[in-house]
Image: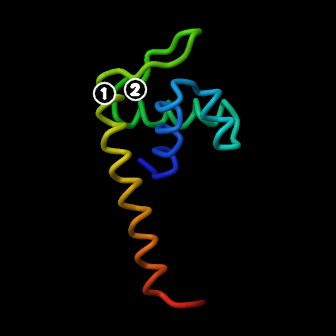
Amino acid sequence: MELEQLRVFCAAAERRSFSAAAAELYISHSTVSRAVAELERELGAELFERSPRGAALTPAGRELLSGARRLLSAEAELRERVRETGGEI
């Protein structure tokens, strides 16, 4: 599980749309689909219920969204702390 996959997953989950996530992240729809499919394969769980009207999270997807948000927040905080203490390159 990669942080970038989690970023893509969160964008799709929050927008309930792979297309909207792709537009927001400036990536292709197929890149979003591929990232989600890889997560589903790795976790052994379906994360979205897909329909022509959008994508709804499954219970597993809701659990992943909660944890992914915490991980991404912690990663952003860590980056900021390192920048603040690291000085200039």
The image quarter in which residue 53 lies? top right
Do tag 2 and tag 1 residues touch (Cβ < 8 Å)? yes
The percent position of residue 85, horizontal first and vertical second, equals 43, 86
Residue 15 drawn at (x, y percent): 53, 29
Which residue is identified by label 2? 47
Left or right of residue 89: residue 5? left
82 sits left or right of 43 in the view = right
Q: Tell me the residue at 45%/72% (across/down).
A: 80
- Residue 30 vs residue 38: left or right? right
Q: Where, quadrant-wise, is the C terminus in this rendering? A: bottom right
User: At which x and y percent is residue 12?
Assistant: 52, 32
- How crowded pointer 1 is (Cα within 10 Å; few <14, some 14-19, many 20+) is rated as some
What kind of residue is marked 2? Leu
Residue at 33% over, 29% down: 62
Nearer to us in this view, 8 or 33: 8
On screen, 2 above or below 85? above
Q: Nearer the viewer, residue 8 or 38?
A: 8
Q: Amino acid at mark 1?
A: Ala
Mark 2, other Cα within 10 Å: few <14 / some 14–19 / many ≥20: many
Marker disc for residue 69: none
Quarter of the image where one finds residue 20: top right
Q: Where residue 48 sits in the image (x, y, percent)?
A: 43, 22
Q: Secondary structure at mark 1?
A: helix
Disc 1 target residue: 60
